[in-house]
Image (cartoon, helix red, strand yellow):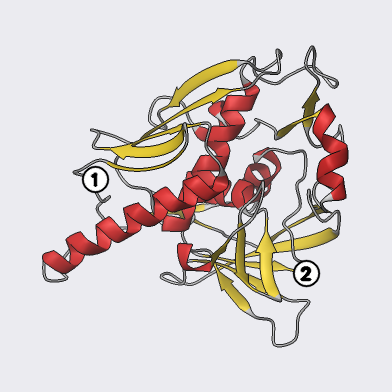
Amino acid sequence: MGHRLTTSVIVEGVGLHLGLTTRVALHPASPGQGRFFVRVDLPDQPIIPANLRQVRESLLSTELGTPPATVRTVEHLLAALVALGIEDVRIDIDGPEVPLCDGSALPWLQALESSGLTPYATGETPWVLTMPLSVQEKDAFVAAFPSPDLRLSYGIDFTYAPIGQQWLTWQPQAENFAQALAGARTFGFADQIAHLRETGLIKGGSLENALVCDHETWLNPPLRFADEPVRHKLLDLLGDLALLGSLPQAHIVAYKASHRLHTRLAQQLEDWAQQQFDSSGGTG
């Protein structure tokens, strides 16, 4: 079951990395248009489709487009859209980075639900993965396996005592997005802040929109979940997989991964699905 926006909604806020305030207006789009951004602040208002062909290399976030028409840190918004089954939406944005809000997808979820979503049957059969796929860099990897349903698993391993090792599997049919992942906030480390800002990153980060810890403790408790960091990584993974358009029936497992590995695995999934389509004579 999918959903369509009934009315337009507006969210405004500061972007995590560039520190600029931007305004995002989400509008209903016609069936088949997909999810797409429009840089309304640029001449000719260029369109940036939210798909894998638009992915640019980006550190600590996912960026889409071709300079100067780019949009950055799209993953939290896209996670909320795919979780709600919103396949067609126009996203007007007047700057280069999506607002971070409180560091989670919850503000996006609440804004989208406030529009009075209209449910509709997509009529599409979810595509089913029938062979394993994987990408790996050193001990970090993302893999997809055949599965009777959609599930996402994530493992993280940090030397910072407040986080340490965390593993979690999320099954949307057992625990919905709002309960399990939407409220999990982005996180960072106190001893890395100065270096990241020197390299032009996290200019908009603060203790109000990100969890921060040192090697011993959290600087801005309380946490919303005991395992909030790994839940946020699952949120990021879901947002990056949203660039596929619709999610496959598969078990996707990530360990110590990055946005780059997420999107590389998503590209493998898309290529595999296209091969199946081509081999079937284009009949699905």
Tell me residue 26's x, y (percent): 65, 62
Image quadrant where residue 107 sits: top right
Q: Horizontal placement of 279 versus 255: left or right?
A: left
Q: Amino acid at mark 1?
A: Leu
Residue 50 is labelled as: none
Residue at image position (39%, 54%) is: 246
Residue occupied by mark 1 = 129
Q: Image height check: is 138 above or below 200? A: above
* The one of 87 and 164 positioned closer to us in this rendering: 164
Q: Residue furthest bottom?
A: 44
- Between marks 1 and 2, how big is the CA–CA gap? 38 Å
Q: Amino acid at mark 2?
A: Asp
Tell me residue 81's x, y (percent): 54, 51
Residue occupied by mark 2 = 94
Tell me residue 257's x, y (percent): 52, 37
Of tags 1 and 2, the one toward the viewer is 1
Q: Image height check: is 76 above or below 224? A: below
Residue at image position (56%, 42%) is: 258
Q: Image height check: is 247 above or below 88? A: above
* The one of 183 and 57 positioned closer to us in this rendering: 57
